[in-house]
Amino acid sequence: MILLQKFSEQLKKEGKSHNTIYSYHLAVKDFFSWFKGTFDKEPTVLYAQNVKDYVQFLQTVKNQGATTINAKIAALLKYNSFLISIGIQTDLVIFKNQRRKIQQKFASPAQFTTKDVNKFIQAVVEKGNARDYALVTLLTYTGCRISEALNIQINKDLHLSSNELVIRAGKGDKERTVLLNTKVVNAIKAYLKIRNEHKHADSPYLFVSNKAERMSRITANEIFTQYSEKAELDRKLTPHDLRHHFCSNALENGFNVHEVANIAGHSNIHTTLLYTNPTRQKMLDKLNRL
């Protein structure tokens, strides 16, 4: 486990995001647990056969999909390279071509229609507050990740006079600038007026809570659960659902793939292409016309 900690420290030195470090750490730790349970000892180096057996275990016993397995293979590949870099292992036993083929041409059809999203937003308008409305509006019209929204600093990242937001804590710690439409700007301005009276008014972060100077993801999830219930949706709408909605909606309304990729912060344009799928209802409408 000491090696695992050193691995995480190395990832941090390389500038990997907190989420990436956590995911890699957890993936390698899961492999360690499998190895310990199988051979009753801790692994020192990686062996190709062990990795193949582990992947088979994930597929057949854990019934995990290609996306999950590929993420774990990527983490083990990085760990393999780390072991080589510190002189514990001499050979690379994991290769990118070991990743599972993913039979996915599109993202899952949107579970929420524009009407559902509007009902959710209206629930915030009628039964919420300025902070929650600003957060939901921001996510709806920029497609940013919830982690990015919660990391926004007022004086450093927010430029309402020019309708711009600098996102510095995106996936892979890449910086990008996104434009804010009038709805988002007005929602944030209304929130800032009330925020000035908050006990955490001096916090550099835009979104604060009663518990902390920066709203936590737990609090954000609670907010989405609350308004999903008030909107009487069939299931909980999540921050990622709003991101999905933004990408699909933007592509359907004239934005090209490169524009959406830039706004959403997709490092690979193929990720954006997944959102070119129609909604479930539109797919049914087309099928019914056959």
Image (cartoon, helix red, strand yellow):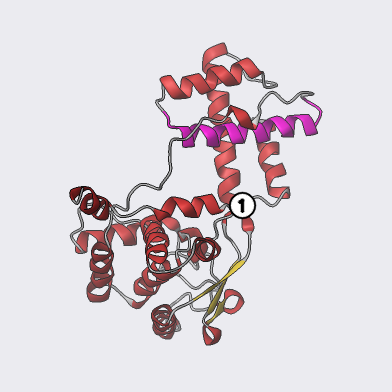
Question: Along the line of sight, which residue is nearer the eye, 9 or 47?
Answer: 47
From what the image shows, is residue 184 above or below residue 15? below
Residue with the most extreme right position: 87
Q: Which of the 4 image quadrants contains residue 90?
A: top right
x and y percent of residue 237 in the render? 30, 56
Residue on which disc 1 sits: 17
Q: Is residue 164 left or right of residue 96?
A: left
Which three-letter amino acid code belongs to the residue tagged 1?
A: Ser
- Numbered circles on residues, count: 1
Residue 16 highlighted magenta (yes or no): no
Is 233 on the left or on the right of 60, as rendered? Answer: left
Q: Pick whichever, 43 or 76, lies toward us.
A: 76
Q: Which residues are magenta?
A: 64-88
Q: Residues within 10 Å of mark 1 (few under 14, many from 20)?
A: some
Residue at the spot x=28%, y=70% of the render? 121
Identify the element where label 1 is drawn: loop
Q: For the point 52% across and 30% down, which residue is it? A: 100
**Image side of residue 248 versus residue 148, left or right:** left
